[in-house]
C-alpha cells in the first residue's frame, strides 16, 4: 500500500484514489492526461483546503507542546525513507533521546541539594558526569555526541 499523509488524505477524493490505482493498467496516452488531471485537481483542492478558515493538519491540531516536535517529525519521516535514510534517522533519534536524557539529568542534578554542596567543594560539571550516560551509546553515537557537545 502506498504511503499517504494527512494532507494527501484531505485533498484527494475517493474517485481520485480509484483513478490513481487504475493508472498503471490503462494506455500511456490516457495515463498522461489523467496524471495531469489528478495533479491539477490536488492543487486546486490544496488551495481550497488552506483557504478555509482554521484549516490545519493533524500535527498542528494537537496541543502546542507537540508542534514542531523534532522527535515526532523524525519518527514520522521514517515511514517514507529507504533503508539507508532510515538508519540515519535512527541514529538521529538515538541522539535526540540521549540529549533528552542528558537534559533531564542535568536539570535534576542542578536542582538537587547535593549538587549545590558539591559545586561549592569541587569543579564537577554535568558534562563530566555524562561519561556514565555515554556508556549506553554506540561508538558512532558517542562520536556524534562529542561533536554536538562541542557546539554547546
Image: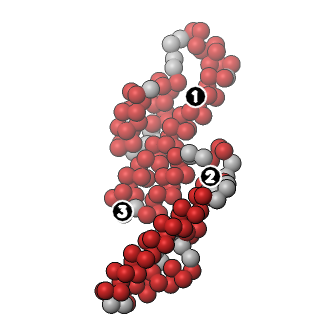
Say above or below: 41 vs 103.
Answer: below
Check disc 1 and report the residue beneath it.
106
The residue sitting at 46% across, 57% down in the picture is: 77
Work out how far the residue at label 1 is from the one at label 3, CA to CA, in angstroms: 34 Å
Say above or below: 70 vs 5.
Answer: above
Give the x, y percent position of residue 117.
64, 13
Say above or below: 150 vs 142.
Answer: above
Instruction: Name which of mark 2 and mark 3 comes first in the sequence.
Output: 2
Residue 83 marker: 3
The residue sitting at 60% across, 34% down in the picture is: 104
Quadrant of the image containing the C terminus: top left
Q: Nearer the viewer, residue 5 or 138?
A: 5
Q: Residue furthest bottom?
A: 26
Residue 60 marker: 2
Label 1–label 3 contact, CB within 8 A: no
Give the x, y percent position of residue 53.
67, 56
Question: Is residue 14 visible to us here?
Answer: yes
Left or right of 134? Residue 57 is right
Work out how far the residue at label 1 is from the one at label 2, CA to CA, in angstroms: 30 Å
The residue sitting at 40% across, 84% down in the picture is: 23
Give the x, y percent position of residue 36.
39, 75
When asked about the image quadrant of residue 68, the answer is top right
When asked about the image quadrant of residue 142, the answer is top left
Secondary structure under badge 3? helix
Secondary structure under badge 1? helix
Give the x, y percent position of residue 65.
65, 43
Question: Is residue 6 visible to us here?
Answer: no
Crowding at dot 3, Cα within 10 Å, few <14 / some 14-19 / many 20+, comes out as few
Say above or below: 51 vs 34.
Answer: above
Amino acid at each position: 500500500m502506498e504511503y499517504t499523509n494527512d494532507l494527501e488524505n484531505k485533498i484527494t477524493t475517493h474517485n481520485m484514489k480509484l483513478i490513481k490505482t487504475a493508472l498503471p493498467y490503462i494506455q500511456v496516452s490516457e495515463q498522461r492526461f489523467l496524471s495531469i488531471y489528478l495533479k491539477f485537481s490536488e492543487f486546486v483542492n490544496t488551495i481550497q483546503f488552506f483557504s478555509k478558515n482554521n484549516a490545519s493538519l493533524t500535527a498542528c491540531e494537537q496541543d502546542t507542546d507537540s508542534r514542531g516536535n523534532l522527535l515526532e517529525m523524525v519518527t514520522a519521516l521514517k515511514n517514507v525513507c529507504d533503508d539507508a535514510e532510515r538508519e540515519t534517522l535512527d541514529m538521529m533519534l538515538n541522539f535526540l533521546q540521549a540529549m533528552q536524557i542528558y537534559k533531564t539529568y542535568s536539570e535534576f542534578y542542578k536542582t538537587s541539594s547535593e549538587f549545590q554542596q558539591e559545586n561549592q567543594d569541587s569543579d564537577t560539571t554535568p558534562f563530566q558526569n555524562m561519561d556514565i550516560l555515554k556508556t549506553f551509546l554506540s561508538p558512532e553515537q558517542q562520536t556524534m555526541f562529542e561533536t554536538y557537545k562541542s557546539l554547546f
